[in-house]
Image (cartoon, rainbow, N blue to C red):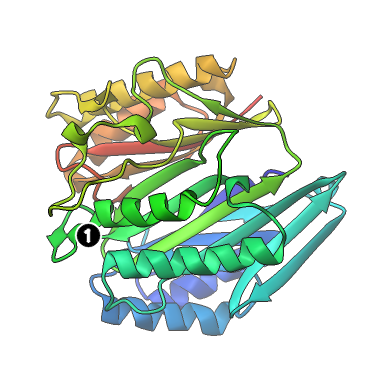
Amino acid sequence: MFPYLINIKSSNANFDAAIDELLKQISTIENVVRVVFFAEIANNEVYSQRLAICKEKIGEKFLFCIIAQKPLSAGVSVECEVAFLKTHQFDSLQQRKVENVNYFVAKKDGQKSVFSTINSENLSLSVQEQSDNVFGRLLKILEQESMPIDSIVRQWNYIEHITDVDAGGQRYQQFNDARSSFYAKADWFQGYPAATGIGVGSGGVIVEVNAVQGAELKPIDNALQVPAHKYSDAVLKSGNEKKATSPKFERAKLQDNKWLYISGTAAIRGEKNVDLSAADMQTQITLENINDLLQSADMTMANVVALRVYVKRSSDFFAVKQVVDKLLPNSMAIYSLSDVCRPELLVEIEGIAQK
């Protein structure tokens, strides 16, 4: 089972009204399992208010999260990515709960998929503490479904002010250390998940997970880049005396030899940033990296069906979009304003490809 995606946009400047507009359109889509809302949210006080608005309007209809990233398409105030299953993909689809966390379970022909979205419960805690809490609740979900940790095939990790350094060290590194500790409970014989680690303006730590049991899974590497989980100390930044752990993800993950989850990809060769200060040139290098991944999975750029393009500076949007449109003209894409995990990186791109 692999969720299909559709993007919906609202130009309404009022958040409450924008959500109503989006939910009206979402209500026409069957078997929605997750909705990701992208909106500019300046601080955690406003974030908590808007989260409460969404909780009241959505209830337990589907999983959702709010990602504090400004949509970059002209005139758009809130954009959302809707993940849904088609009826032929499952024999059963149920929403379940453990310790006040909702998740979906889909089953068909001996294959079982879990879809979860976990928000930080306390935004005042450190990133390390928030991450430990989120992973602890994710473990409860997997345990309830008798699924191992290494059944996680795709993970999205959103970290507030990702490159900042506080008392616990660099915030992204704090998250990576918590993830490494959580993942150490599994063997990962089929490789780590595909993943994205990206910055948000507020909202603490948010983790979305797709897990699957009974599927054929294959990690896909890129000849141009060192696997992220093999990064050396030279590129890891703890911000304190604690030894840094590497980001535990694969460059891509192939499911059932049909669907490819492309991890967040940037202008990195080997394990170091490419020395390019122009966003369009970084985008070109990033897409070359993605093309190499696709070739390793016996695919081409024509197989890419969906993208998220994270842009650090709004002034770079049109230059970045021009490069993406030239190489991937038929791909559905969300563009958002967000910080990337290294200060020098201006663009990060993730995607989904289908044979």
Q: Quadrant of the N terminus?
A: top right
Residue 119 in picture, x, y percent from top left: 45, 70
Q: Is residue 307 left or right of residue 213?
A: left
Q: Nearer the viewer, residue 148 or 206?
A: 148
Q: Residue at x 52, y 41 (%)?
A: 193
Up-down: is 115 above or below 335? below
Residue 308 in picture, x, y percent from top left: 42, 42
Residue 155 in picture, x, y percent from top left: 50, 49
Q: Is residue 55 left or right of residue 272?
A: right
Q: Quadrant of the C terminus?
A: top right
- Kind of residue sitting beneath label 1: His
- In the rendered image, which residue does mark 1 sit on? 161
Residue 261 in picture, x, y percent from top left: 54, 36
Q: Residue at x 72, y 59 (%)?
A: 146
Q: Residue at x 46, y 82 (%)?
A: 53
Instruction: Using the rendered view, name the quadrant where residue 202 is placed.
Output: bottom left
Q: Is residue 97 left or right of residue 277?
A: right
Q: Is residue 253 left or right of residue 258?
A: left
